[in-house]
Image (cartoon, rainbow, N blue to C red):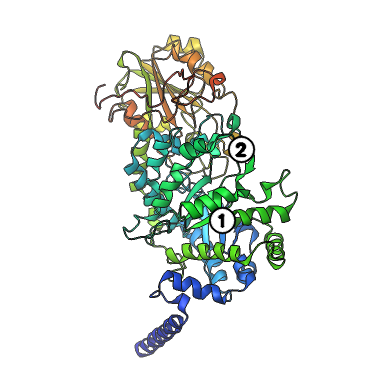
Amino acid sequence: MVKTLVVILLLCSMVAAAMAQRSRHVTYKDPTKPVNTRIKDLMTRMTLAEKIGQMVQLDRTAVTWGILRDYSIGSLLSGGGSGPLPQATALNWINMFNYYQNASLSSRLGIPIIYGIDAVHGHNNAYKATIFPHNIGLGATRDPELVKRIGAATAREIRATGLNYAFAPCVAVCRDPRWGRCYESYSEDPDVVISMTEIITGLQGDIPSNSQRGAPFVGGRDKVAACAKHFVGDGGTIGGIDENNTVTNTHGLMSIHMPAYYHSIIKGVSTIMVSYSSWNGVKMHANRDLITYFLKNRLKFRGFVISDWQGIDRITSPAHANLTYSVQAGIQAGIDMVMVPYNYSEFIDTLTDLVSKDVVPMSRIDDAVRRILRVKFSMGLFEAPYADDTFVSELGSQAHRDLAREAVRKSLVLLKNNNAILPLPKKATRILVAGTHANNLGYQCGGWTITWQGLSGNNHTAGTTILSAISSTVDPSTEIVYSENPDAEYVKSSNFSYSIVVVGEPPYAETYGDNHNLTMMEPGPNVIKNVCGGSMCVVVVVSGRPLVMEPYVEGIDALVAAWLPGSEGLGVTDVLFGDYGFTGRLPRTWFKNVDQLPMNVGDSHYDPLFPFGFGLATKPGQA
């Protein structure tokens, strides 16, 4: 039996060696050859159909084994909330990815897929992943090194599920908090956003000193391809309306919205996603001057440019009104990979027809495919296309949760602290915890958590609510009373030592978050009035942006901006109770009323409730 096993193993090793030797005779499969040589060899073997297939990204729900194999599809994605099954484990994800990858490798040339996902504050689609604070909170930390570590942790959690491409970071400069994506922006200040591009080196690895300018770089099996988005000006639209028009001159675009892309390219970002928005009336998905002439030619970006979800379709209004025109305009503008994401045959047929009629030149197709292949070769996909279970234990690991907790406590901004009420004493007779957001993990995490729009409740993923964090932080002798919306008379008559009110916004994402009132969700104002009118109170605001607070701030003893802290509520109590001091600073201006908007630091009409960069500091252990 032992002799038979030895013979079998020997035969397997001989077969593997023979296959490896045969691969080396195919230049593009030989890892010892220069990347450009491998790209050139592979492209000479590709048909037009295979090249166009590489330019297609499809949602996982729209593909079969046969589609991936027969059309040489370049990429898949999981749209917001899309996974192999509800509450999928890391191994469920890995098995799904390897199934799709096996189909791609079964194609004529065996070109592996790259699989993208919106991992925008941790690997937020995956059940029990670590949910980090959204970008607005990270901007409040002013800590690029922390953000780099978060990028590295996020990459390892993505790799834990077998995937290899993150649609992050968002490097938008949000100039109007009415925009529904403002929490995806690190700051209203381009310099803060520039500093936060350090997350790219966490996601992808530190680019080698001898790397060619603009070349994509992914530094190992524990790293993923990153995506700077949304090119360009998405945070400057009129009225903060999502996907709208950014009206500014060239200087305004280049000085406010463009710098983060330049720094992302310097750091080796692999891909850049185009914005739905327009610049001075020209749809970005059709803007050849900015995508090809500026981004590719002037900034020397050598990775690939990807559309947003159905971004090509939305070049026209209504969307999909003239697909032939949209495909022509988008591809000619310089988009390399198209997030179709469903009707692959319509897109492929349309682009094939445009090329056959010489409307879209073959040189444009070759440029797109060359860029896509460059990213895939830089990721080592041809040598190691399959996922394994190496990083499974990293998903939601304690080390990553500790890192998220650190990020939370560094992101909190103390806006008011009358009579040095903070930090709070852990030992008290009786305390009240109130508000809609005190015991709701979904609200605490915000949009882009498990699903696209986010959820309400505590049963959708793993984490610690602020209420639970308070319970585990205070002295065991302290009585905690929790009431989401207590009556004013009850508060006055209960003689609480102090009260903590946690209020804010419900979860949202993208256009669904556009809000021209910026008021907190009900019954938040009533809770503040009832609680703060009857006891010493700390108000913690859980939101993706500044909200209307001027009517209430005078009656509040202490006010804390917690942003969207994510899964680790203990980071909030770390500073409320003085284990750590408050250090966060406002990443954006806190307005008095919405009639002032847009209002950013440096504006002539600047008259904020709390200015950009404001944040009171406390020292640990003062309670």
- Residue 280: image tag: 2
Q: Is residue 507 left or right of residue 70?
A: left
In primary-sequence order, the first of circles 2 and 1 is 1
Seen at 46% across and 37% down, the residue is 255
Of helix, strand and loop, which one carries label 2? loop
Where residue 64 sits: x, y (%)?
A: 63, 65
Residue highlighted by disc 1: 77
Q: Amino acid at mark 2?
A: Asn
Q: Nearer the viewer, residue 374 or 400?
A: 374
Q: Nearer the viewer, residue 97 or 613?
A: 613
Q: Nearer the viewer, residue 341 or 26?
A: 26
Q: Is residue 476 left or right of residue 80?
A: left
Where residue 372 sits: x, y (%)?
A: 52, 62
Picture quadrant of residue 192: top left
Picture quadrant of residue 582: top left
For the N terminus, which image quadrant? bottom left
Where residue 600 sits: x, y (%)?
A: 47, 26
| Mark 1 Cα-neighbour bin, 10 Å: few <14, some 14–19, many ≥20 | many
